[in-house]
Image (cartoon, rainbow, N blue to C red):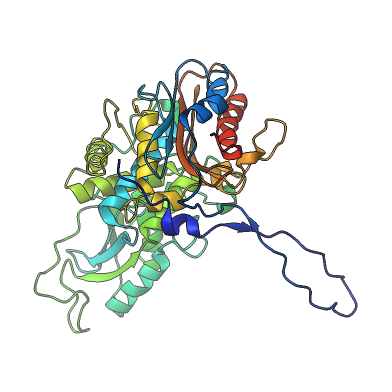
């Protein structure tokens, strides 16, 4: 593999945690201003000149941990130098393994490569075929909100779209709202076990929904299960109808009329009602880079499935579970990281039919570190150990000997019953960036011990020069 320019601008922006300072008195005159405390580095920038670990050094550091029994015998592990692409360690690295949510790295890489980090997903309102009818067309944005109190910060909002529609229609009333979610095809529930479907960590996947389909969105419950609508497209349509003042029971499903080719995007006057298919308004999601960050940091399954379908749409495949899997596999080929015996069944990792290897995941992460790679943004979107997302509460206790990885490990977690995984990158004590993946799909112990075993492997890499 050609030499890679390690993480360039991605890691040059080191995250910092305030070091803290004295509290101000509650009363009395203000004390003299004190200088701001120096920030403490959470993820230092990586230098290409850092000493490279050796294969023997990495094996000596982690082999006993890998074979220690907490993760079982069905383990796939690989460690790669992100600068050179050289494999430094492998333990059954090419064993196809149930990856759980580490598959979201594949979803992130392929959607960024297909559409680019600045791409936005649009939700559009158009004039219906009948007078007084407005069609709400979903573009696959799972973060769409009804109003300012949505689950996802910075999301597109239906109340703003309704305002555009009212301005376009003037005093013409809306008597009917039709919802068009036909951008996505196939079954709305994935190849998941029944307990997954009802877990609250996922819901039916449609091209139109608000707040990831949550019935009662609460941003404070970021990584906890939430009840989901069984018909999220109709639920979004009902909110939109209320915002437009349409009568109760006026929401149905149906396709949007084709836009007239010879008319402007918006109605040009008030004398005549807009022709069927005329655009009345649109709102757009945050940039794709932000959606990828939401997916990876919080391991958001609905966002993952929606983004997987965007890969399918970009490739001309049906926007279904099967179409997304085929498109992502083809996307990996284009990135030079073929599946090689792996299998994709969904974009979230909830299906036990998925199979990936540690070799593939480390190659994917290492390749993202290359200069001007289309999927480089996945690195900046990863959770930081002891700091953010699914790693926020890990790498903190000194007892399991994992604190050396705090701030130095950026990785995607994966967890199903008897499955635990961790894949991402770590900066060694001497500043070298390594890509690593540990996948275990027959874990014989409780998950807290398995996660500690994963974190100790990554922390050991962070704490050593491994030479």
What is the residue that sits farthest to the left in this orientation?
Answer: 262
Q: Is residue 76 visible?
A: yes
Q: In this rendering, is residue 372 above or below 406? A: below
**Residue 280 % position (x, y):** 26, 71
Residue 208: image location, x then y, percent: 33, 52
Can residue 180 be seen in this snapshot? no
Residue at (52%, 50%) from the top-left corner? 216
As drawn, the residue found furthest toward the right would be 28
Relative to 182, is 62 on the left or the right? right
Residue 300 position by quadrant? top left
Q: Judge from the rendering whether residue 231 lies leftward or rightward of residue 467; answer left or right.
A: left
209 is higher (above) or lower (below) than 366: below
The answer to whether residue 63 is left or right of residue 319 is right
Q: Quadrant of the N terminus?
A: top left
Q: How many discs appear?
A: 0
Q: Against 324, is 159 above or below?
A: below
Q: Which one is nearer the viewer's eye here, 464 or 205?
A: 464
**Is residue 383 placed above or below 151 in the rendered structure?**
above
Say which quarter of the image contains residue 326.
top left
Residue 23: quadrant of the picture: bottom right
Q: Residue at x 43, y 49 (%)?
A: 379
Q: Residue at x 87, y 71 (%)?
A: 26
Foreground pick, 304 / 169:
304
Q: Give coordinates of residue 146: x percent, y percent.
A: 44, 61
At x 28%, y 49%, the residue is: 310
Residue 6 on image: x %, y %: 42, 50
């Amino acid at each position: 593999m050609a030499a890679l320019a390690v993480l360039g601008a991605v890691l040059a922006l080191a995250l910092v945690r305030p070091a803290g300072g004295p509290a101000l008195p509650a009363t009395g005159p203000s004390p003299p201003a004190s200088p701001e405390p120096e920030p403490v580095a959470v993820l230092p920038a990586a230098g290409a000149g850092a000493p490279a670990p050796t294969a023997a050094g990495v094996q000596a550091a982690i082999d006993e941990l890998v074979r220690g029994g907490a993760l079982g015998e069905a383990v796939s592990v690989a460690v790669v130098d992100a600068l050179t692409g050289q494999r430094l360690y492998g333990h059954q690295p090419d064993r196809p393994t149930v990856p759980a949510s580490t598959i979201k790295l594949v979803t992130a890489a392929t959607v960024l490569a297909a559409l680019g980090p600045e791409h936005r997903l649009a939700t559009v309102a158009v004039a219906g075929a009948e007078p007084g009818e407005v069609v709400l067309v979903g573009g696959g944005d799972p973060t769409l909100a009804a109003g300012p109190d949505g689950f996802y910060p910075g999301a597109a909002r239906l109340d703003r779209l309704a305002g555009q529609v009212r301005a376009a229609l003037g005093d013409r009333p809306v008597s009917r709202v039709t919802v068009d979610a036909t951008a996505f095809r196939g079954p709305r529930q994935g190849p998941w076990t029944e307990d997954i479907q009802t877990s609250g960590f996922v819901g039916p996947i449609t091209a139109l929904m608000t707040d990831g389909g949550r019935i009662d969105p609460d941003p404070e419950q970021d990584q906890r299960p939430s009840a989901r609508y069984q018909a999220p497209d109709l639920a979004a349509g009902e909110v939109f109808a209320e915002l437009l003042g349409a009568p109760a029971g006026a929401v149905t499903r149906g396709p949007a009329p084709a836009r007239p080719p010879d008319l402007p995007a918006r109605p040009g006057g008030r004398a005549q009602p807009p022709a069927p298919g005329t655009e009345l308004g649109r709102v757009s999601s945050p940039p794709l880079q932000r959606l990828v960050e939401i997916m990876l940091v919080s391991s958001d399954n609905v966002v993952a499935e929606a983004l997987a379908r965007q890969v399918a749409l970009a490739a001309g495949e049906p926007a279904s579970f099967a179409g997304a899997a085929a498109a992502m596999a083809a996307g990996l080929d284009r990135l030079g990281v073929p599946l090689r015996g792996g299998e994709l069944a969904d974009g979230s990792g909830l299906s036990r039919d998925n199979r990936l290897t540690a070799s593939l995941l480390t190659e994917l992460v290492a390749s993202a570190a290359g200069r001007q790679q289309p999927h480089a943004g996945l690195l900046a979107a990863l959770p930081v150990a002891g700091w953010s997302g699914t790693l926020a509460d890990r790498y903190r206790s000194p007892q399991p000997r994992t604190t050396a990885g705090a701030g130095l490990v950026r990785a995607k977690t994966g967890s199903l019953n008897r499955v635990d995984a961790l894949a991402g990158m770590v900066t060694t004590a001497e500043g070298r960036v390594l890509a690593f993946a540990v996948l275990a799909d027959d874990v014989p112990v409780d998950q807290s011990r398995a996660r500690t075993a994963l974190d100790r492997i990554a922390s050991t890499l962070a704490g050593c020069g491994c030479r």
